[in-house]
Image (cartoon, rainbow, N blue to C red):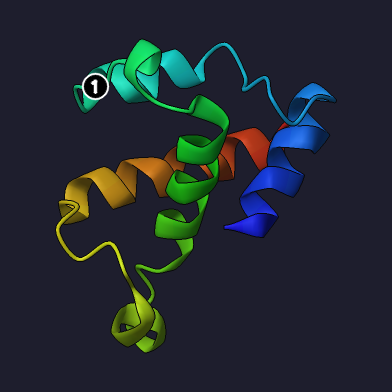
Amino acid sequence: HELGHCVNIALTGNPEVVPEDFALVTSLIGVNQDDCDVSEFFAHCFAMSLLIEAELLSADPFETVPQNHKQMFRVYFQHKIQNL
């Protein structure tokens, strides 16, 4: 989770502002950015993108989040990090 905040800072320079294109991710899963702390949600999504690894599944506190959402988070963060 905390690494997600670091990724956010690397991408935007501001821990409170997420990349503009993150709005697409939230809209695809039906999350209204106005109803949540977006920078915290961004960090949670980053954590979920890593916790899909088989050896980390037992440590995943986000069990109720659909696997396809976590896979989408993985693709999103891979793309963002590769284009830093």
Establish if 56 lies above or below 38.
below
Is residue 42 visible in the rendered image? The answer is: yes
Give the total number of marks visible in the rendering: 1
Query: How many residues crowd around disc 1 within 10 Å: few (fewer than 14), some, or many (20 or more)?
Result: few
Helix, strand or loop at label 1? It is helix
Residue in the picture at 57% in, 11% down: 20
Residue picked out by circle 1? 28
Specify whether 48 is left or right of 22: left
Q: Amino acid at mark 1?
A: Leu
How far across and how far down the image is residue 13, in percent?
A: 85, 25
Specify whether 47 is left or right of 2: left
Is residue 84 visible in the rendered image? The answer is: no
The N terminus lies in quadrant? bottom right
Frontmost residue, 19 versus 76 = 19
Frontmost residue, 64 versus 79 = 64
Frontmost residue, 4 versus 76 = 4
Residue in the picture at 40% in, 57% down: 48
Q: Quadrant of residue 26?
A: top left
How far across and how far down the image is residue 72, in percent?
A: 33, 41
How far across and how far down the image is residue 79, in percent?
A: 57, 36
How far across and how far down the image is residue 31, in percent?
A: 26, 23
Specify whether 36 is left or right of 4: left
Residue in the picture at 38% in, 16% down: 33
